[in-house]
Amino acid sequence: MSIDLTSARRLALSACLGLAVALSAAPSYAAAKIQRLVTPGGLVAWFVQDATAPLISMEISFDGGASQDPADKPGVGHMVANLIDEGSGDMDSATFHERLDRRAIQLSYSVNRDHFRGSLRMLKEDRDEAFGLLRTSLTKPRFEPKDVERIRAQLSSTLRRQSLDPNNLASRKFLEVAFGDHPYGRPSTGTLDSLPKVTIDDMKAYVGHVLAKDALKIAVVGDIDAAALAKLLDDTFSDLPAKAQLTPVPDVVATKPPQRTNVTLDVPQTVVMFGGPGIKRHDPDFMAAYVVNHILGGGSLSSRLYSEVREKRGLAYSIYEQLLWMQHSALFIGSTGTRADRATETIDAVSAEVKRIAGEGPSEKELAEAKSYINGSQMLSLDTSAKLAQALLQYQNDGMPIDYIDKRSDIVNAVTLADAQRAAQRLWSNGLLTVVVGRQPQAAAQPNMVKPAGAPPPARAN
């Protein structure tokens, strides 16, 4: 049987990734030595040299993200993220992607409220090609009209589908309720009204204002030495502007609970999204909040909310709750799904458990079990080069020290019962912001239990 070169490279990359996972079972990545690399050109990267497999993973981010979208055009950054690799320099979209595919290079971009992010993975032997394509996509994006309209149509189609998805509607409405007209209250993916208004000039302006060296953070893990990496980084990013031109974003505290908003949608399942103001990443109570939040709703099958809502009352198949932190605010947020005529009962059950933990805090047993889980899961979450690179970038964006991975277990273990009780009171003593999306309660009853409202979003390094 014959196999083409591109397929062979994909198989080689997949095999290397599998090998990296297998060899890291006794978590070598979590224990790896993290270097602070400063290039001759003055760029800074967090770097782990690892020859377990002949591959390199890099994560980058630029400060700004969707918060830099014009107030009347949410979605500019999202369109840039979807178009910046659709051709660059003298390469049209087809040529650019053919060069990626030929060597099975994985390059992607995304945007969240605070950051414009890029991800690059390649086999070691293809590093010059991969970094070169990254460079041209960042510094010479084409934004060809035909590509812009094709991507705009795709993104608009996605938004139309999401307009009928209760989970998406609940998330958008919750952020609108929590943040109002602050940039965090606007959808980072844009709206059906805003995307048609985004022009090529808007996207070029976004690139010129946001993608700059002083806003750049870099994390690299893989089979490359420091000197070779430093040269590649300087070659890749040297043509970027020295300084970003970011619009200042003010700090904001989410709307104070309690408050309830209903959105009518004729769907079989009613989605309940709940939350409120959180605790920011550099607050002294953050880790205590993280631990006690695991007890309330972050522990999946072991959480209090799962026990109360699913096991004791049979109101839903799943429920989750987590902390979200951003550069200028923080939230706790959770979601579940239930029958329309049981939505109020579900909200009451969640509210009662939130009130109980805010008043009493967790038990010593719950605290010990949460610490054990959090410390163990940290090791498992860093079992590949890509995951470690993502975590290192997140820690940089959060302003953590470079040795944070080594210190994290001690920080978790230092949380006392009094700390957890104080954090619980801060988070939940005021009750809940609640958004309910679905049929009115008097709608015909559905089967006793419904499928979950959706899996929780990917876990975040903390």
Image (cartoon, rainbow, N blue to C red):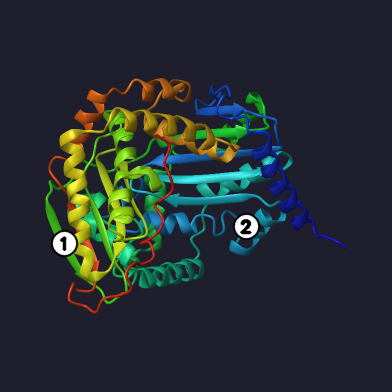
Residue ID at (38%, 61%): 452
Q: To which residue does mark 1 refer?
A: 261
Quarter that holds the C terminus: top left
The kind of residue tagged 1 is Thr
* Nearer-N-terminus badge (1/2): 2
Foreground residue, 421 or 160?
421
Residue ID at (28%, 22%): 416
- Secondary element type, mark 2: helix
Where residue 128 sits, quadrant-wise, is top right
Find residue 158 and report its horizontal and vertical position in percent. Answer: 41, 69
- The answer to whether residue 169 shows anywhere in this view is yes
83 with respect to 188 (left or right)? right
**How far apart are labels 1 and 2 at the CA level?**
46 Å
Find residue 421 and report its horizontal and vertical position in percent. Answer: 21, 30
- 429 w.r.t. 195: above or below: above
Q: To which residue does mark 2 refer?
A: 96
Foreground residue, 458 or 204?
458
